[in-house]
């Protein structure tokens, strides 16, 4: 194996590098590294979960590519060990944003009129360490988009307001961890009552 003659104890990347990209902005880089079996133990630390891909610029990632999960290791039986390594990165921070609108009539709770439901679905990749604060920011962002407020209960059954009123509905949230990065999908509902009048 002539490619190892100049670096007999080192870790060498083969020419194969594949990149898979997903709508959320998540990217997976797959690479294969080879070393002499006698030095495999040394290189396991280099290829540990959370480490950067050695000898790789992490493109198309915008903030690095990090190994996850643990590499697959194969001893070829000819004195060399092969590591099959995956690393994840993100190529944007915005992700995929989708909106859905529905119109329906409403009555009860002191309201008669036409209501409009706005659903915002976001699939994006965030730094795992920022996951908790990110969801709170997402809800606040939809409040800013709609001016959402909670209805004011006047006598325990009626809602008094003038013009249009947005109110936030349920929030659903899913996440999949990829080491340093987490892919999240969240859906936030907001409702607006148009032409609504108190009963």
Image: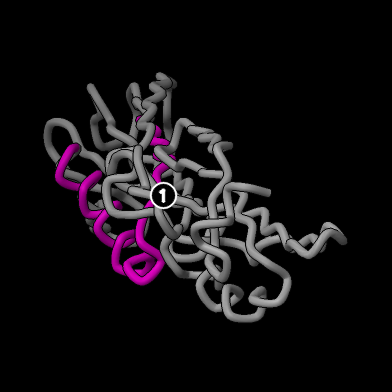
In the image, 24 versus 60, the foreground residue is: 60
63, above or below 197, in the image: below
Please give the name of the residue rendered at 67% of the width and 53% of the height, measured from the top-left corner: 84
* Residue 46 drawn at (x, y percent): 50, 72
Q: Label 1 belongs to which residue? A: 89
* Residue 141 drawn at (x, y percent): 21, 48
- Picture colour scheme: one colour
In the structure shown, which secondary structural element does the residue marked by tag 1 occupy? strand
The main secondary structure of the magenta stretch is: helix
Residue 94 is left or right of residue 85, and the answer is left
Q: Quadrant of the C terminus?
A: top left
183, above or below 48, in the image: above
Q: Point out the stretch of residues depicted in magenta.
A: 118-145
Please give the name of the residue rendered at 57% of the width and 56% of the height, measured from the top-left corner: 5
Residue 98 is left or right of residue 148, and the answer is right
54, above or below 115, in the image: below
Query: Magenta stretch: residue 12 in it?
Result: no
Counting labels gives 1
In the image, 70 versus 164, the foreground residue is: 70
Q: Specify the quadrant of the image occupied by residue 164.
A: top left
Badge 1 density bin: few <14, some 14–19, many ≥20, Cα 10 Å = many
Please give the name of the residue rendered at 39% of the width and 50% of the height, measured from the top-left corner: 56
In the image, 172 versus 193, the foreground residue is: 172
Query: Magenta stretch: residue 144 in it?
Result: yes
Please give the name of the residue rendered at 51% of the width and 35% of the height, measured from the top-left corner: 19
Residue extending farthest to the right is: 77
Q: Specify the quadrant of the image occupied by residue 108.
A: top left
In the image, 146 versus 131, the foreground residue is: 131
Residue 43 is left or right of residue 50, and the answer is right
* Residue 162 drawn at (x, y percent): 12, 36
Q: Specify the quadrant of the image occupied by residue 166.
A: top left
């Amino acid at each position: 194996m002539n490619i190892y003659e100049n670096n007999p104890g080192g870790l060498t990347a083969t020419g194969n590098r594949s990149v898979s990209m997903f709508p959320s902005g998540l990217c997976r880089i797959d690479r294969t590294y080879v070393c002499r079996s006698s030095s495999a133990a040394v290189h396991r630390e280099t290829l540990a979960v959370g480490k950067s891909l050695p000898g790789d610029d992490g493109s198309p990632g915008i903030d690095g590519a990090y190994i996850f999960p643990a590499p697959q290791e194969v001893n070829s039986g000819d004195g060399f060990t092969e590591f099959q390594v995956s690393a994840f990165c993100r190529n944007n921070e915005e992700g995929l944003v989708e909106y859905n609108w529905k119109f329906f009539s409403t009555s009860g709770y002191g309201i008669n009129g036409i209501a409009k439901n706005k659903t915002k679905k976001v699939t994006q990749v965030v730094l795992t360490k920022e996951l908790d604060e990110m969801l709170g920011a997402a809800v606040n962002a939809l409040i800013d988009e709609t001016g959402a407020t909670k209805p004011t209960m006047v006598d325990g059954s009626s809602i008094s307001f003038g013009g249009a009123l947005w109110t936030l509905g349920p929030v659903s949230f899913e996440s999949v961890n990829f080491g340093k990065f987490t892919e999240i999908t969240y859906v936030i509902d907001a409702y607006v009552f148009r032409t609504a009048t108190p009963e």
